[in-house]
Image (cartoon, rainbow, N blue to C red):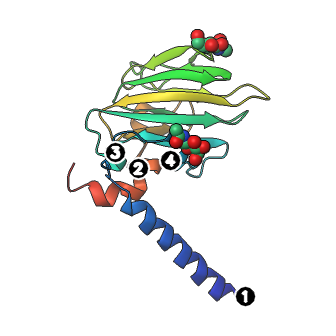
Amino acid sequence: MGRGACRMLALVIISRLFVSVAASCSNQGSFPVRNISKMAQSNFGRGGLSHITVAGALLHGMKEVELWIQTFAPGSRTPIHRHSCEEVFLVLKGRGTLLIASSSQRSPGKPQEYPIYANSTFSIPVNDPHQVWNTDKNEDLQMLAVISRPPVKVFIYNDWSMPHTAAKLKFPYYWDQECFHDAKDEL
Ligand SMILES: *[C@@H]1O[C@H](CO)[C@@H](O)[C@H](O)[C@H]1NC(C)=O
Ligand SMILES: *[C@@H]1O[C@H](CO)[C@@H](O)[C@H](O)[C@H]1NC(C)=O
């Protein structure tokens, strides 16, 4: 297949995917119970991540909270980031490190480090820059995360010394992108 034909085919496949995903946006469904094993999961371009929006604003019409299940392969981590919503984690499997800094200085500065492990829970105060890291060499780190005030608006830092004002806004966030254009009229 020539390069042009290949590109065309890829475009067709991508647009099909988009349509099938978009069709399920903001779809509560008539049956209230959903099987997590059947829900879409993706790495959304971040190596080692598996993210499922279990209950979401854009996907399921949630208004106040959103629930995620995230699995981090050994060595993988979130970007250093902050958001102006609350976030609570419950570690289901594995272990890792939470790095967290304060929003009170000009830039995050050296973060505090805390071990996290299966059956531990932690919450992230509004606007505190943080990073979750699977520091284990063998095991996945799996967490349930709840955020308030969805959809999430994420500010990303290149490093801990970057001024808060220079952190880059990513909105809609990667897993909200597919449904954002459908849903924004209702938000
Ligand atoms: C949930 O989905 C998984 C994967 O398709 C399936 O194996 C399992 O039986 C389902 N559970 C129920 C209770 O339907
Ligand atoms: C987490 O808690 C559950 C329920 O109490 C228990 O069965 C499990 O062994 C615990 N896991 C770890 C790693 O402590």
Note whether 63 is above or below 138 in the view shown: below
Note whether 85 is above or below 18 in the view shown: above
State the mark number for residue 39.
4
Residue beneath the point at 25% across and 38% down: 63
The residue at which mark 1 appears reads as 1
Spatial CA span between label 1 and label 2? 34 Å
Tell which tag, 1 or 4, sits nearer the viewer. 4
Marked residue nearer the N-terminal end (3 or 2): 3
Marked residue nearer the N-terminal end (2 or 4): 4
Residue 72: x percent and y percent?
Answer: 64, 35
Spatial CA span between label 3 and label 2? 23 Å
Residue beneath the point at 42% across and 20% down: 105
Note whether 49 is above or below 135 in the view shown: below
Residue 183 falls in image quadrant: bottom left
Tell which tag, 2 or 4, sits nearer the viewer. 4
**Residue type, label 1:** Met
State the mark number for residue 176.
2
Spatial CA span between label 2 and label 4? 15 Å
The front one of 133 and 142 is 142
